Image (cartoon, grey):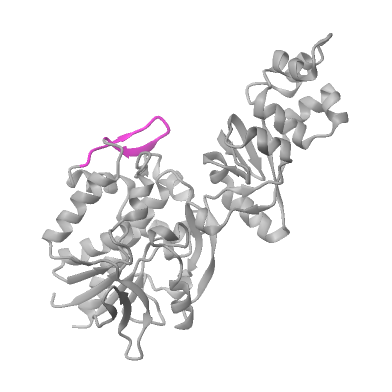
Amino acid sequence: MDHSVAIIGGGPAGLMAAEVLSEQGVKVDVYDSMPSLGRKFLLAGKSGLNLTHSEPFEKFISRYGNQKKEIEKWLMDFTPDDLREWARGLGVETFVGTSGRVFPVEMKASPLLRAWLKRLDKSGVNFYLRHRWVGWNEDKSLKLETPAGIKNIKSDAVILALGGGSWARLGSDGAWSHWLSQAGVKVNALKPSNCGFDVAWSPIFKEKFDGQPIKSVILSFGDFHQQGEFIVTKEGVEGSLIYAASALMRDEILANGKAVMLLDLAPDKTESQLVEKLSKSRGSRSMANHLEKTVGMKGVKAGLLREFISKDDFGNMGQLAFYIKQVPVPLIAARPLDEAISTAGGVMFESLDENLMIRELPGIFCAGEMLDWEAPTGGYLLTACFASGRKAGLGMTSWLESRK
């Protein structure tokens, strides 16, 4: 196929698109604003690359919320099992952890990325680093800022795989939304996803418990109920359990100005069991000692109770037991977008055709996190980014063939 295309963005989505196109004989040039490729991908693998998840496909698809029908189209052609087989083809074996999450045996992202880039290089893909896309020229050519100055690029088609708006220092700053909006593309405002939240801690609580983990609790918010752990920070809360409910809690704050999560601090005990234990005579023991001796409540968990329930309720064993099972923690705001693990919002699906080409801009495709979808952590984000890159690459291949 005698065509030359440009891919803007060297993360998983952009590189997967490059692989698909180069396999079809297309000349592929990948441009990235950073000094090296896949920076956010490498960060994701710093503490163990969670590549995908092993749960049944129907449950896997449900993780994508309102956009699951759109994302299912990508994943039907590139399933989590396909992703594992693809990694095996690069010499990277994977295993299923106790939580069902899938990791490379070596746990790291760097061996996979190195092998992948080597294969892409052999297939003829060209990489241009420190090339930052800053919009279009009047003749529709791409405008790129480079160390040598502005470069203007003409290509037969373009895939934009520029990421979301979190972790701007790794290259995903969301600046693309301006250029696309100017071109008439519908873009939903970027919002933090898999994020922490601000809580108005008292100075005493903040000083005493900043950095403390809260383990084995159940977080409830609306229909969401999940057991896990998270961390207290001086600003508020963050960690895996918080991230799992973050989309719901963020949207509640955006709609109503606040959200209140409920924490069950003693999942292994019923409220009646707590009442029975707490009602035992404490004699000369302090209330803090009584809480610890009877129900094992101490440290940051006991601090949470004192932070959010009244003195009267704290002294009433029935009320205290009630709040141990559902202490309310008011959330003020999501932490800033740049701190979030990922991004919600982006290019709306109504602006795209079935091949992820922008309807208003024929020959311009989008892939990855810059599209208007989100997913919890657990391998769901990466899997869909890979699959969307493949979808865009195949879509562009078909489009180019139709223009012969």
x, y percentage for residue 84?
Answer: 27, 44
Q: How many marks?
A: 0
What residue do we see at 24% from left, 47% from top? 112
Q: Taking 29 as reference, is 213 above or below it?
A: above
Q: Quarter holding the C terminus?
A: bottom left
Visible residue check, residue 265: no
User: Farthest bottom residue?
Assistant: 138
What residue do we see at 51% from left, 53% from top? 340
x, y percentage for residue 318?
Answer: 83, 24
x, y percentage for residue 157?
Answer: 27, 78
Q: Reply yes or no: does residue 309 show up in magenta.
A: no
Name the residue nearer the viewer: 401 or 270: 270
Q: Taking 368 as reference, is 217 above or below it?
A: above
Q: Is residue 230 left or right of residue 130?
A: right
Q: Taking 403 as reference, is 300 above or below it?
A: above
Name the residue nearer the viewer: 233 or 329: 233
Q: Taking 190 as reference, is 94 above or below it?
A: above
Q: Is residue 179 left or right of residue 328?
A: left
What residue do we see at 17% from left, 65% from top? 125
Magenta region, residue range: 92-105
What residue do we see at 47% from left, 82% from top? 182
Image quarter of residue 243: top right
Image quarter of residue 31: bottom left
x, y percentage for residue 226?
Answer: 58, 36
Q: Is residue 327 left or right of residue 121?
A: right
Q: Quarter holding the N terminus?
A: bottom left
Q: Reply yes or no: does residue 101 show up in magenta.
A: yes
Name the residue nearer the viewer: 313 or 357: 313
Visible residue check, residue 373: yes
